[in-house]
Amino acid sequence: MTRAVLSLGSNMGDRLAFLRLAVQGFADVLEKASPVYETAPWGVTDQPDFLNAVLVVSSPELDEWGWLRRGQALEKAAGRVREQRWGPRTLDVDVVTVAGVTSEHPDLLLPHPGTPSRATVLIPWLAVDAEAELPGHGRVADLLAALPPADREAVHEREDLHLIP
Ligand SMILES: Nc1ncnc2c1ncn2[C@@H]1O[C@H](COP(=O)(O)OP(=O)(O)OP(=O)(O)O)[C@@H](O)[C@H]1O
Ligand SMILES: Nc1nc2c(c(=O)[nH]1)N=C(CO)CN2
């Protein structure tokens, strides 16, 4: 039995449809789905805005590699092709944490090392779990409070969009 937090992102094509494709792909293991957020791009800033969201999932069968494989299969189903690092994509599924698991394998770093600095992950995560903790880094609420205000202000809830119609 593992419980995982997954981050979803899309900034190409029908962004909401790609996020929904991911939600449908995890429907059998879905515990919680966050609101949808419109977010300014970080990393490569000269690209379209993203939609981002977070899912909490749990399964008696899947280990951390199972979560990665399922996410990658959904990225493939969304027509994602290998592209520039941090560049535009139809669907990105990152494994943020798997409860009780740390990994330094380059194909599966856990917790995902980008998490503490990404308001695009921390804000949706906090929306579904106000008490969330990132193993080794403390409370998600504290991580978010420590970010520059501009990072938090670049993330806007889209109340008109829903992962589950
Ligand atoms: N926790 C993780 N979740 C998803 N992929 C991971 C993780 N740790 C390592 N990877 C590896 O990262 C590789 C590249 O992933 P990807 O192209 O999505 O990176 P990116 O989204 O551009 O950047 P970032 O990983 O910083 O968000 C994949 O081959 C995958 O195996
Ligand atoms: N706002 C935002 N920017 C990004 C994102 C993302 O999900 N949201 N993902 C990236 C590559 O992983 C690069 N930049």
Image (cartoon, helix red, strand yellow):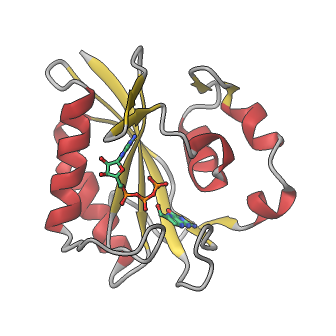
**What residue is shown at x 48% (from left), y 68% (from top)?**
86
On the rendered image, what quadrant is the N terminus found in?
A: top left
| Residue 127 seen anywhere in this rendered image of the structure | no
* Figure check: 66 above or below 102: below
**Residue 96 point in image, percent of width and height:** 45, 38
Dividing the picture into quadrants, the one containing residue 17 is: bottom left
> Total of numbered circles in the picture?
0
| Residue 130 seen anywhere in this rendered image of the structure | yes
**What residue is shown at x 18% (from left), y 45% (from top)?**
70
**Residue 140 point in image, percent of width and height:** 67, 33
Dividing the picture into quadrants, the one containing residue 42 is: bottom right
Seen from the viewer's position, the closer of residues 70 and 36 is 70
Q: Is residue 160 left or right of residue 19?
A: right
Dividing the picture into quadrants, the one containing residue 88 is: bottom left
Seen from the viewer's position, the closer of residues 21 and 50 is 50
**What residue is shown at x 64% (from left), y 31% (from top)?**
130
**Residue 135 point in image, percent of width and height:** 56, 21
On the rendered image, what quadrant is the C terminus found in?
A: bottom left
Q: Is residue 156 left or right of residue 35?
A: right
**Residue 85 point in image, percent of width and height:** 44, 68
